[in-house]
Image: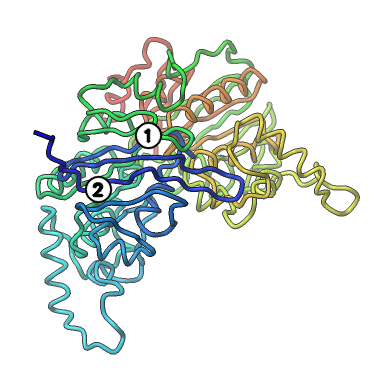
Amino acid sequence: MPEENNNVLEMNNITKTFPGVLALDDVTLKIKKGTIHALIGENGAGKSTLMKILNGVFQASSGEIILGGEKLEIHSIKEAQEKGISIIFQEFNLINTLSVAENIFLGRYSNSSLINWQYVKKQAEELLERLGFYLDVNKMVGKLSAAEKQLVEIAKALSYQAKIIAMDEPTSSLTKKEVSMFFPIVEKLKNSGITVIYITHKLDEIFNICDTVSILRDGKLVGESPVKEITRNQIIEKMVGRSIDIEYPPRSAGPGEVIMQIKNLSQGTKLHNINFELHRGEILGIAGLVGAGRTELAEALFGAYPPESGEMILNGQKVKIHSTYEGKNNSIGLVTEDRKETGLVLEMNVAKNITITRLADIQSGIVLSNRKESQVTEKYVAMLNIKTPSSNQLLNNLSGGNQQKVVLAKWLHSGSDIMILDEPTRGIDVGAKFEIYNLMNSLTEQGKAIIMISSELPEVLGMSDRILVMHEGTIKGELVGDKKTAENVMQLIVQ
């Protein structure tokens, strides 16, 4: 007897072309009902494009979508929702100035309708209860945590009677504790018969909760397997098209002379009596839980939020940095935690984002030279392997990993001797991470110093020469050599 087809969704032979770009090349995806199906690949592999076709944002150049045995043509997000397809993107589609209930049912009622708010709130509460959580539906979304906003997005999807919910990097903004609370919610959706398409760069999550994994590379489907029948290394090899024998590349450079000294730096309730030294040619890792003061320290050093007391000594000279302009002029660069909000100008193109930190290099007299701008941009596009059709491509059209490379290129172009990297690999794939690690090693070999903040403890342990452990705005200890272990980091945090 033929095997019963229990696929809830089939995307058959999907091809999508943009001017000068083949984004998807004959991709076929078959997803079974009531499963958690991982969709992974390097940045720019085609994951988001495939989901936007499913969601009606893009139309496929060729191919077909079959949902529950019915061939569909989806021309809008509204049509997708009416068919039971909802997608939760990495950037939440919520309005901070509206309540939880209003966000869940936004757009469902016309302005001329007499809205029964008591009924709406009751419906919102019932949707959240289905997820096993109580949340005040009157609360403004702007006052919610990232995990709570994720709940609101899922409840909104359920309100459309979703049969399929796609989640794009759902844990990228969650703490470790919030992630442990989020996984049971995804399992609950699966157990209720809802199919989850789970897009992530975190391979551990695939093995924790996913049933099947599909792997994209350069717009093609290069692998599909039950999760229990594939290894982590096999996934990585298929994603990047080559074997990565080591996750954190070794570095030949060693620490040199002291380039920065920080003495008794304090800032209100955020930072307390911070003391440390930074050497040329080293990577100084900063570990700690979310809220430990790591980002606040980075911003204080760069001048975004100047400290209230303490000393900074650069190359033996005492300096005071009261603004980001002064930070840049003192050869400090900051790759911020949120590249979209504070690292890039998404409405500008690649070239202008890269060259903005040092316009003097692209001037010809008193005007900016397009030729020089192109030369500088092409240098960094090649150096960092930035995947873009041209230097005129707008930043908001690039994948997250390539956006991150543009931020790094911007500060490389500035000529900074001290690079502060706050979550430098957040939301990017294994292959792009490896490229950034190699770049960091290359910078240290040039005598530059790096301060790296990361919530990925293996990354801190694997890339740092020394580790400062922060908790509640203070440095609890320093770890070097064989003392750099996960156990020692956690002991310093909880002591």
Is residue 186 left or right of 93 when viewed as pictured? left
Amino acid residing under circle 1: Ser
Give x and y (percent) for residue 292: 36, 39
Residue at 19% in and 67% down:
137
- Which residue is labeled 1 in the image? 455
Amino acid residing under circle 2: Leu
Establish if 438 lies above or below 80. Answer: above
The front one of 396 and 97 is 396
Give x and y (percent) for residue 445: 63, 17
**Mark pair 1, 2: CA separation:** 35 Å
Determine the image quadrant of residue 183: top left
Give x and y (percent) for residue 83: 24, 62
Establish if 28 lies above or below 440. Answer: below
- Which residue is labeled 2 in the image? 9
Give x and y (percent) for residue 201: 37, 35
- Residue that protrudes farthest toward the front in the picture: 1
Is residue 73 left or right of 295 when viewed as pictured? left
Within 10 Å of disc 1 (Cα), the crowding (few <14, some 14-19, many 20+) is some
The front one of 146 and 1 is 1
